Image: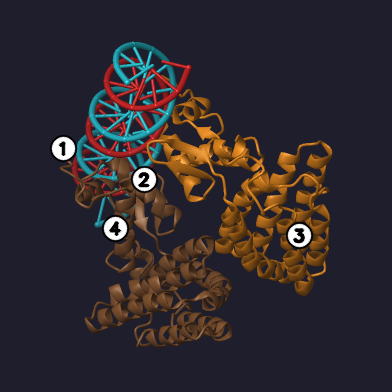
Chain colours: A brown, B orange, C cyan, D red
Amino acid sequence: MQVMVEHSGGGSGSGSGKVADSLATAIHEHRLSPGMKLNEDEVGEIYGVSRTVVRAALQQLAHERLVELKRNRGAFVAQPSVREAREVFEARALLEPRTARSAAERAKATDVKVLQKHIDAEHAALRAGDTGRALHLSGMFHIEIARIADQTTIADFIAQLVARSSLIIALYWQRRTALCESHAHDALIKAFGRNDPDAAEELMKHHLVDLLTSLDLRDQPSVAKSLKDALK
Amino acid sequence: MQVMVEHSGGGSGSGSGKVADSLATAIHEHRLSPGMKLNEDEVGEIYGVSRTVVRAALQQLAHERLVELKRNRGAFVAQPSVREAREVFEARALLEPRTARSAAERAKATDVKVLQKHIDAEHAALRAGDTGRALHLSGMFHIEIARIADQTTIADFIAQLVARSSLIIALYWQRRTALCESHAHDALIKAFGRNDPDAAEELMKHHLVDLLTSLDLRDQPSVAKSLKDALK
DNA sequence: GTCCACAAGATTGTATACGAATTTGGCGCA
DNA sequence: TGCGCCAAATTCGTATACAATCTTGTGGAC
C-alpha cells in the first residue's frame, strides 16, 4: 500500500520509536485529549507505517501509562483517575525534591544555561498563547533537572511521571489559577545558579505542592471520563 | 507450524503478558543469566506462540530494563553496569523507606499475615537450597509493602527496581556475605505488626544500605559482562 | 412501541512471509 | 601462515493475511 519513500528524518531509532515520540508529544501538548481513540490503521496511515509498528508504539506508550490498551477494543489516550493523579504527585514528591538537591550540588554554569533556555522557550510559548507547548517545556524542565543530578534511572521515572502529569493537568486543571508556575522555575534556576541544595530541595517541594493544589481533585474529572459522567 | 491446541492456562491476559511474566520470573530466579541471548524463534517455540507475541513480550521487558534490545542483533538479558546498579539502589533509597512508613501506618493484621507468608516461603526456599526462588520471594516482599502502602504507582516503580536489583545481585553479589537478609525482613514485619512507622522507615533504610554494601560495586561485574572482560 | 436475537461490519490479536542487516564460514592472496 | 574479502546462513524489522472478538444495525416477536 504505502511506498515508504524514505523515513524523512535520518533515523537511527527502531521506527516505532518515532511514532511513539510523536504521539507522546501530541499528548504532552494536549493535542490528543484523554479518552481519545487511537485507531491502529488510522495512526499507521498518518505515519506511513504498518500496523505492526503502530502496535509497538502503542504498547510502549501503554507501558508509560500514557495510553490504555483494552483487549479487543483498542488503544485510548489514558484518563488518570483522581486516585492515580494523587499517586503520581506523591511519587513526584518523593523523587523530585531530593533530586533537585543533588542537581543543585552538581550544577555547572552550562547546566544552568540549558535550564534558562528551557524557561525562555516556555515564556515565549506562553506569550504566543501556545499553552500546550509551554506545558511540554515546563515538563522538560523537570526532566532536565534529573539529568543534571546525573541520575538517569530516576530521570526516567520522573519523565514518566511528568508525562502522566500532563494528562492529569488536562483532566483536572482548574482554569481559575493563572500564571502557571514560571516563577517557581525562575526561583529554582537561581538556587541552582548559586549551588544552594537546601533552597533547591525546598523550592521543588513547594513547587510540587503548589502544582497539586492548583488541581481540582475533589470530584470527577472536568473533562468527562465516560459518557455516564458527561451526560445524565 | 504450531497448532495452538488451546492456551493451556485459562488465560485472560493478552498472550504476550504470559510470556513476559514467565521470562521475568526466570530472570528473577537467576535461571536466565545476564547477557544471555533470547532468540525470538526459540522463545516462540518454547511457549508455542509466534514471533509476534514474543517480540511484544521482549519489548515490555526491555522497557522494564530487564532485557536489552540491540537493533538487528536481538534481545539479551540485561547486564546492569556498576553505575546503573548504584542508581537503582539510590532510587530505592528514595522510594522505599517512606513507602514502608506509609505501609506501617496502614498495615492491618491481614497485611502482616501476607507478609509473614512471604517470609515463611522465603525461609523454606532457602532451606531447600533454592536461592533463586528465595531471592524472588524476597523481592515480592518489598513489592507487597508498597501494595500495603496503597500506592500502586510507587509499587510499580519498586517492582521494576526490585527486578533490576535481581539482575544486579546476579552480577555483583559477593558470595562471602551470608544469610541473605531474612532478619531484616523479620524486623520489618514486627514494625508493621505494631504499626510503628518510624521503625519501619528506619529499618527499610538500613536494610537497603546493607543490601547495597553487600554488593561488590568497586570493579567490573563478577560475571563477565562481555567476553573481553571474561578472558584476557 | 419496546425489547431481544441475529447478522453484517469493523477492529483488534496472531501468524506467516518477505526484505534487510549482521554474523559466520570459506576462499584467495600476500 | 595470516589477513582480508566475498558469499551463505542466520536473525531481526516490517508488511500483509487470516481468525477471533466486539460493535452496530436490522428485523421480528411480544
Query: What number is the disc on residue A56?
Result: 2
SS at circle 2:
helix
Q: Real-space Cα distance between discs 1 and 3? A: 59 Å
- Please state the chain letter of the residue tagged with numbered disc 3 in the rendered image: B
* Quadrant in which the C terminus of chain B is drawn: top right
Tell me the kind of residue under disc 1: Met
Q: Residues within 10 Å of mark 2 (few under 14, many from 20)?
A: many
Query: What number is the disc on residue B52?
Result: none
| Residue drawn 67% across the image and 54% down it | B218
Q: Real-space Cα distance between discs 4 and 2? A: 13 Å
Q: Real-space Cα distance between discs 2 and 1? A: 20 Å
Q: Which residue is mark 4?
A: A22
Name the residue nearer the viewer: B132 or A174. Answer: B132
The mark that comes first in sequence, 2 or 1, is 1
- Please state the chain letter of the residue tagged with numbered disc 1 in the rendered image: A
Q: Which residue is mark 1?
A: A1
The mark that comes first in sequence, 1 or 4, is 1
* Quadrant in which the N terminus of chain B is drawn: top left
Q: Say which of marks 2 and 3 sits in front.
A: 3
Q: Residues within 10 Å of mark 4 (few under 14, many from 20)?
A: some
Q: Real-space Cα distance between discs 2 and 3? A: 39 Å
Q: Say which of marks 1 and 4 sits in front.
A: 4
Q: Which residue is mark 3?
A: B210
